[in-house]
Amino acid sequence: MFMASRIQTRAFSASARNLSKVTVLGAAGGIGQPLSLLLKLNPRVTELALYDIRGAPGVAADVSHVNTKSTVKGYAPSATGLQTALKDAEVVLIPAGVPRKPGMTRDDLFNTNASIVRDLAKACAESAPNANILVISNPVNSTVPIVAEVFKSKGVYNPKRLFGVTTLDVVRASRFVSEVKNTDPADENITVVGGHSGVTIVPLFSQSRHPELSSNADLIKRVQFGGDEVVKAKDGAGSATLSMAMAGARMAESLLRAAHGEKGVIEPTFVESPLYKDRGIDFFSSNVELGPNGVEKILPVGKVDAIEEKLLDACFVDLKKNIEKGRKFVAENP
Ligand code: NAD
Ligand code: LMR
């Protein structure tokens, strides 16, 4: 009897500790739908809140029939819809906003997406100030600084809890290398640093199992412009959604693993970073060890070769402008 109640108490406290509400803002979109499905399949997610300006209740009803334990609720814009979707969230993923069409850069999305992300960030700052915020909406190099500025203006900014999702860049790098080398992508762990657009994406092949690839200009370009391949192939119907959903679900899973006590969980992500502050770069994507408080440790970039040094110089030029643009937007459009 005593044993049974002790086991029960222990089981209860373990599960209470691991209750994880995850919220998706933009859940009915191209990324939002498959991302929500993958999150429903994740046993670490106990409650899934799906919000969109249109269609989220339908997506939620659909996903809710998947026979895993978590509960799923859909929220439409209403007096309290967004607020309730965000309340008590541990992780908030934001894929809300418009995607590219052929011929556009990610920066061309700024005019539309900056205000969407700013407004959602305000709601997060008010209703989920302690959540881990994972920004997927492009241009990530600017939308992450936008969220930071909004949180600062509300007095709740915690740089350890704000992440730009750059996971797709390492997913692609690993896959593209495996195609060149005829290997299993699972064995190709490629470090990618910088930002998330064109030349700000810097793969560090010199640190991989194939250091000679650092002089493979075509491969470097493919990693930097992998998103364009999908935009072109979709021919006006949007950008990467399925591979992005997988990458976003991986990042959310890593954060939850770390939050639930697993040590040594490392993901690349675009965060406020000391690594290149001396070059005027305040946000930078690099490998980051995750922990219960979000960012546990920003890992150093490590040794790079002369070619990669040049790639980093080019990255800094664009990245600095992108970060400034995001900050200026919030200053001028609070
Ligand atoms: P989509 O148009 O298919 O979906 C976007 C969704 O956002 C829509 O359902 C729309 O109703 C919703 N939305 C718009 N404004 C909103 C608001 N204020 N609140 C809540 N929801 C809102 O686009 P998509 O293909 O899912 O892409 C979304 C974003 O993700 C784009 O900006 C795209 O560039 C970006 N993206 C980023 C990465 C990355 O690696 N970080 C990869 C792929 C795409
Ligand atoms: C990607 O890398 O696929 C995304 O950033 C979407 C895009 O516009 O390319």
Image: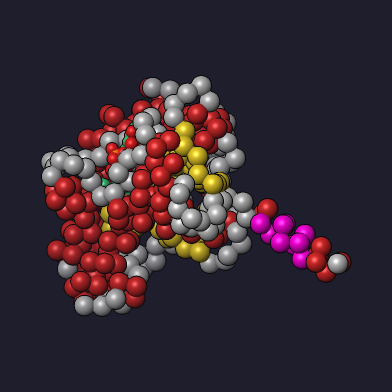
Q: Is residue 71 visible?
A: yes
Is 20 displayed left or right of 115 in the figure?
right
Q: Where's residue 159, x and y in %?
A: 51, 44
Q: Nearer the viewer, residue 206 or 306?
A: 206
Is 308 displayed left or right of 150 in the figure?
left
Q: In the rendered view, tell whether residue 187 sits above or below residue 199.
A: below
Q: Is residue 152 visible?
A: no
Dominant secondary structure of the magenta stretch? Answer: helix
- Name the image colouring: secondary structure
Which corner quadrant of the image does residue 175 belong to?
bottom left
Q: Nearer the viewer, residue 65 or 83?
A: 65
Per the image, is 68 magenta? no
Residue positioned 24% across, 70% down in the render: 177
Q: Where's residue 280, x and y in %?
A: 38, 44
Q: Where's residue 248, x and y in %?
A: 39, 52
Q: Where's residue 310, x and y in %?
A: 24, 58
Per the image, is 12 magenta? yes
Highlighted magenta segment, given as a residue range:
7-15
